[in-house]
Image (cartoon, rainbow, N blue to C red):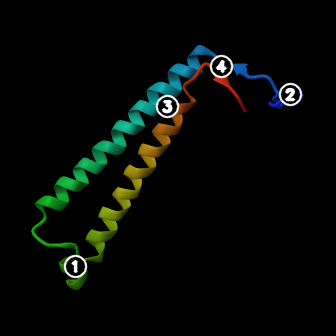
Amino acid sequence: MSKRKASASKPQRRPRGEIDRNYFYGDVLIKTGVAVGVALGLIALYTPFTLMGAINDGMYDYLAVMGTFGVIGIVAFFAGRHLRREATHWDFD
């Protein structure tokens, strides 16, 4: 009686070019996401008003731009993490 089930398919070895490409682009996207986050943080610190002040003054364009770049930074960071995780020698799909 086996306690583990055999996997349906055998893992496939990834080509070295694909591993390097995933690692490189993953690293670039992680750094891009962090850089966008740092830039947004510095802009928010430099801005002389608070978030509620911007909402009360009707500065929705400012909030939309900051929100859009925030989403771009988060998506880039998590896409980079996914690619870095895929930069392995074996594909278990």
Q: From the viewer's perspective, is the residue at label 2 or at label 3 nearer?
A: 2
Labels 4 and 2: the sequence-earlier one: 2
Proximity of marks 4 and 3: CB atoms separated by less than 8 Å = no
Query: Callout 4: few (<14), some (14-19), or many (20+) C-alpha neighbours within 10 Å?
Result: some
Q: Which residue is mark 2?
A: 2
Labels 1 and 4: the sequence-earlier one: 4
Name the quarter where the C terminus is drawn. Answer: top right
Labels 3 and 1: the sequence-earlier one: 1
> Disc 4 to disc 2, how far (Cα)?
29 Å
> Looking at the picture, does residue 65 appear above or below residue 29?
below
Query: Callout 3: few (<14), some (14-19), or many (20+) C-alpha neighbours within 10 Å?
Result: many
User: Residue 36, image x and y in percent?
Assistant: 30, 48
Q: Residue furthest front?
A: 1
Q: Which residue is mark 4?
A: 14
Query: Callout 2: few (<14), some (14-19), or many (20+) C-alpha neighbours within 10 Å?
Result: few
Side (left or right) of 45 relative to 69: left
Q: Label 3: state its secondary structure.
A: helix
- Asked where in the image residue 63 lies, by quadrant, the reply is bottom left
Q: Which residue is mark 1?
A: 52
Proximity of marks 2 and 3: CB atoms separated by less than 8 Å = no
> Looking at the picture, does residue 48 appear above or below residue 82?
below
Labels 4 and 3: the sequence-earlier one: 4
> Disc 3 to disc 1, how far (Cα)?
38 Å
Q: Which residue is mark 3?
A: 84
Q: Label 2: state its secondary structure.
A: loop
